[in-house]
Amino acid sequence: MGLVHEIDYGTPASRSEKQVTLTVDGFSVTVPEGTSIMRASMEAGIQVPKLCATDMVDAFGSCRLCLVEIEGRAGTPASCTTPVMPGMVVHTQTSRLKDIRKGVMELYISDHPLDCLTCAANGDCELQDMAGAVGLRDVRYGHEGENHVRAKNDGVQNFKWMPKDESNPYFTYDPSKCIVCSRCVRACEEVQGTFALTIEGRGFDSRVSPGAHQLFLDSECVSCGACVQACPTATLTEKSVIQIGQPEHSVVTTCAYCGVGCSFKAEMRGEELVRMVPYKDGKANRGHSCVKGRFAYGYATHKERILNPMIREKITDPWREVSWEEALTHTANEFRRIQYQYGRGAVGGITSSRCTNEETYLVQKLIRQGFGNNNVDTCARVCHSPTGYGLGQAFGTSAGTQDFDSVEHTDVVIVIGANPASAHPVFASRLKKRLRAGAKLIVIDPRRTEMVKSPHIEAAYHLALKPGTNVAVMTALAHVIVTEGLYDEAFIRERCDWSEFEDWASFVAEPQNSPEEVEKLSGVPAETIRGAARLYARGGNGSIYYGLGVTEHSQGSTTVMSIANLAMATGNIGRPGVGVNPLRGQNNVQGSCDMGSFPHELPGYRHVSGDAVRDIYESLWGVKLDNEPGLRIPNMLDAAVEGTFKGIYIQGEDILQSDPDTKHVAAGLAAMECVVVQDLFLNETANYAHVFLPGSTFLEKDGTFTNAERRINRVRRVMSPKNGYADWEVTQKLAQAMGVNWNYQHPSEIMDEIAKTTPTFAGVSYDYLEKMGSVQWPCNEKAPEGTPVMHLDGFVRGKGKFIRTEYVATDEKTGPRFPLLLTTGRILSQYNVGAQTRRTDNVVWHDEDRLEIHPHDAENRGIREGDWVRLASRSGETTLRALITDRVAPGVVYTTFHHPTTQANVITTDFSDWATNCPEYKVTAVQVTPSNGPSEWQVEYEEQARQSRRIALEAAE
């Protein structure tokens, strides 16, 4: 086992379909027109020396190492900036070129520290490699005189020297080793799109500078790592490499944070993770990353991680460490006792969107086969279940239509209820690159997010709607498209039900759906709505990307259907560059839905009432399955309070922090007799647990994740589970303790069972994933290589279905007591409930939740920047510090939910989507007033949590 090496071709690939043949050092090479000589040479296996070139950014031509000679052409042009021509004859190695390259390298080395043996990049330094490649043996210019290397020259202060910048928690910047190749600057601009770096000074005084001569931590740098990855020397180096040393082997795996599903090389020394490096062949991220996936993996070895099973009789007792056998036997006995005493339906479980497909499949199988009921639910329901319902109704399948590469072909993008720059940053970088190339952007969001305006991009329209009016605004957009004849009649007649379209068109054309009327509800100017509708309908390939700001509403499913209506009406379905694309919040939200985590659906979105579907599983599992849907999480909690639901198995979810109406969740958990939590840490839900089963990280298991584009990616074990078992093994051992005869030896066998029983996964196996890298479902006989773009020739359901989307105002209304509307979201450095990212150095950017409030609302309440404020709703209250900003409109406040000390969900209500029970997180009527500190509830909660986390000193035998 060694390092996974990727070829750096020097310049990006050309997309031209026309081929050009040339000769390089006597070898004939055929490449696409527009390819650089450098890349063509590398395609032929001939490496031209280079320092400023890398295939992640455009050619620059500054280092002058990659010079070549071309027959019939004077001079020595740079191979990175010179395109190939038919019949061209290139020489990469001549005596003239050798002399030039050696001279160039002498100049570089004359102003570079000669500490190679102790340098962190020793063994992974391109400058070192190129010195060897050009045969450098001496430096004629010496090392004296002006330089950037030494703090003092002959005892005199050297003002060209700069100290190392170690402000960033994850990497260092050593200016003395910088060769000013500009690769980091270009990566920040072209790949990430932040434009945080620049070259200050001129000539010999040039140097890389974060912002206006700032420290990295104080600059606009978002710590995505693109600059570190691009740096050819030790100028930008991971602190982990400095501390541990160079890695000696690597394994390709998949990030366990958001739904983008980035591929990484986990680079190791033995079982110690040295660094995560984005994998260029990863089809979701194409070699890019964000701060979380690139650097925030320290939680895997955090001191608070629980590694031994624990049990206790009452939640007021301290935890007692026990053996795995005792914990699992105790759990099985308790579940059997509860079912005997209260009935078969008195227990249930919750699957995790952070665990693998295989682990999720086993949890729902345990509940259906072992518990004998359908009481299974998932956090996916509290975020994207309206996507499944809405797109299922309109298109016939419960997932997005495109791959991420599709964004490179789009002309107009609608981003609604999502902030990709914070929640899906790698996708956001790809989107912003397309916007810089000329695509237009429409943002529909109550808040002025980073997508509305950032370096070199600005939305053509920002529809800053009042929270809760999504349906009205989407229907108003459709009103303009229909009444102005902007719809695609040919597409609709061919691909959709024309009579249903006519009915829908007559509905959206009604006067109450006009932009002028909707302006009164939403606050969005009518002309802004009309302009956005015309741009989307007329602008070419139109794509829609949406997030939880769409789904987490009482009309979440209705909004999803209105988005589908808009795409079908304009013909923006079934080809690259268009489509309807939900941005999934967690790494395996899509997979947890696919695997049958809902109480009414078996794997593959097939209803439990279907006899034929149940027959498949009954014959395989050897049990009779219940044909009635089970309980959703809110139903389980209600039943617990009523006394009919007594036991729950929760794998990898923290419902006390993530679910709405925290007090109701706490009451439901407190009423149960056996709460089993399987996780990495004693999370908030574990405060009410009787059994704690330690979980494993993504680094410690094999499996698959399915990302937001339906891409099934391999997760590969890179180290042994510190708790002893992968999560799938724990579930299997629990099933065995309950008398279920499972005997999986590897997760690949679980995937084989999934493929055997689920039509959309029929062609998926670990062997096939090894061959293909990844595939997008459906992957079966009809689509053996997967399906990057859905609905190419027709919809899964046959004809696309237009559905009336009547706006119904939420029951959560403002009034004299609660005059403001609270909406919630995420921040770049933190993830979900923060259990992972709070246990990394990411807290330097966000160590508390803050309440964004408009200056007008703050002034009316006597609130100043940083003041403690009381945030109260009909459900409860909490306190946090104010952040005064005009990013939110007057009457709207905003906060994140990453820190349990805030517990933002004590504020949210139990209102939910009419079709799926997805909670209405995004609309809560609140009041904000000055406060002196934590609320009474926060004080009580903190004390209860402290008591609950006590662990008895005596260890298990």
Image (cartoon, rainbow, N blue to C red):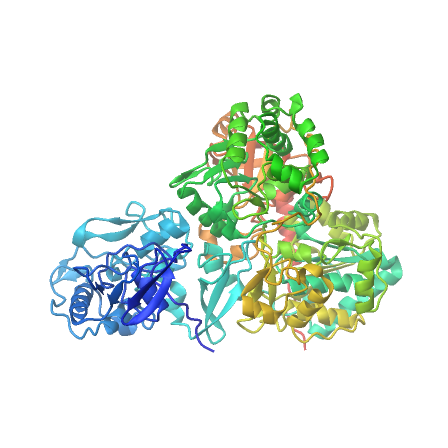
Instruction: Please provide percent x and percent y for residue 827.
Output: 51, 46
On the question of residue 920 being in view, the answer is no
**Residue 363, quarter of the rendered image:** bottom right
Q: Which of 101 and 539 is in front in this view?
A: 539
Number of residue marks: 0
Q: Quadrant of residue 323?
A: bottom right
Residue located at (71% from left, 65% from top): 362
> Is 745 positioned to the left or the right of 42 in the image?
right
Give how far across and how far down residue 193 sits, in percent. Answer: 40, 47
Q: Position of residue 850 (x, y in %)?
A: 52, 41
Can residue 197 be seen in the rendering of this structure? yes
Given residues 525 and 111, the one toward you in this image is: 525
In this rendering, the answer to whether 276 lies above or below 512 is below
> Extreme front residue here?
87
In the rendered view, does 102 fall on the left or right side of 495?
left
Q: In this view, does 306 lie above or below 81?
A: below
* On screen, residue 765 above or below 711: below
Q: Which quarter of the rendered picture does the C terminus lie within? A: bottom right
Image coordinates for residue 106, horizontal then vertical, percent: 17, 67
* Side of 145 relative to 600 (left or right): left
Residue shown at the point (28%, 54%) measured from the top left: 60
